[in-house]
Amino acid sequence: MKNLLLSIFLLFPIIAFGNDIVTLNNQAKFEGKVVKIRNCFVTFKFNGEKFNIPAQDIYSIEFANPKDKVYTSYLELLSTNEEGNCLKGQLDAENYHGKIGFHVVMGVLFGPFALIGAAIAHPTPEKSTKTLMMSQNKELFNNPEYLSCYSRKAKGRNVGHAALGWAAWIVFVLVI
């Protein structure tokens, strides 16, 4: 009986103060404490340091305590759909933001200048005909969080396509 009570007494702090587990897309796991979830970023405290991890890089989060304040506030936030607006913006930019061929051709023709132009541009859903036609989130086109996430994702895609065009030009020059 004494051993049982001692075991319970020693295991209680481990069970009561367990760590949250964050698994990244590359299957790396980290034990620590989720401090905040906001604007498509998870603030995670690991070994005394805080890290802001983009939500798109996270595969899963296991909360040690389902009554944790961060977890319950995140669930409330999801029910108000504010956090979902960022994800909707990213998905719309990924699925509907067009002009892929245009940016590749600009990368071939103008190289680093096309990259700079794509990086300083401010893409919005109104500038993309395909997004205007296909998106089911038209009511969010004035939402600042949606627009910020849409612009960030679309800008990243445009820069990537311009870089692909520039790289194709470099390979073409090297082969000839």
Image (cartoon, grey):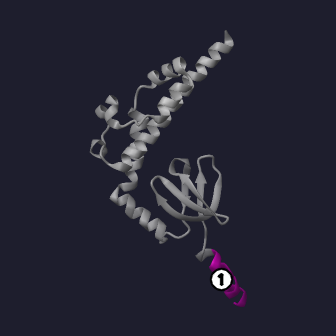
The secondary structure that dominates the magenta segment is helix
Name of the residue lying farthest toward the left: 139
Residue drawn at x 67%, y 64% as measured from the top left: 47
Element under label 1? Answer: helix
For disc 1, the marked residue is 8
User: In terms of depth relative to the viewer, which is nearer, 7 or 36?
Assistant: 36
Which residue extends farthest right? 3
**Quadrant (top left/top right/bottom left/bottom right) for the N terminus:** bottom right
Image spot of residue 86 (x, y percent) = 41, 49
Query: In this view, which residue lies farthest toward the top?
Result: 176
Work out whether residue 40 or residue 111 is closer to the camera in this orientation and state it. 111
Counting from the top left corner in percent of width and height, residue 53 is at 56, 53
Residue 18 rendering spot, x and y as whole percentages: 61, 71
**Is 2 on the left-hand or right-hand side of 157?**
right
Is 85 magenta? The answer is: no
Residue neighbourhood size for the residue with mark 1, other residues' Cα within 10 Å, grouped as few (<14), some (14–19), many (≥20): few
Magenta segment = 1-14
109 up-or-down from 113: above or below: above
The residue drawn where x is 38% and y is 50% is 145
Residue 26 sits above or below residue 30 on the image: above
Residue in front for this viewpoint, 44 or 13? 44
In the figure, 99 relative to 6: above or below?
above
Task: Verify whether residue 13 appears in magenta.
Answer: yes
Give the residue at x 32% y 49%.
143
Residue 48, image x and y in percent? 66, 66
Tally of numbered discs: 1
Quadrant of residue 91 within the rendered picture: top left
Quadrant into which the C terminus falls:
top right
Question: Type of residue at label 1?
Answer: Ile
User: Which residue occupies 44% across, 36% down?
Assistant: 154
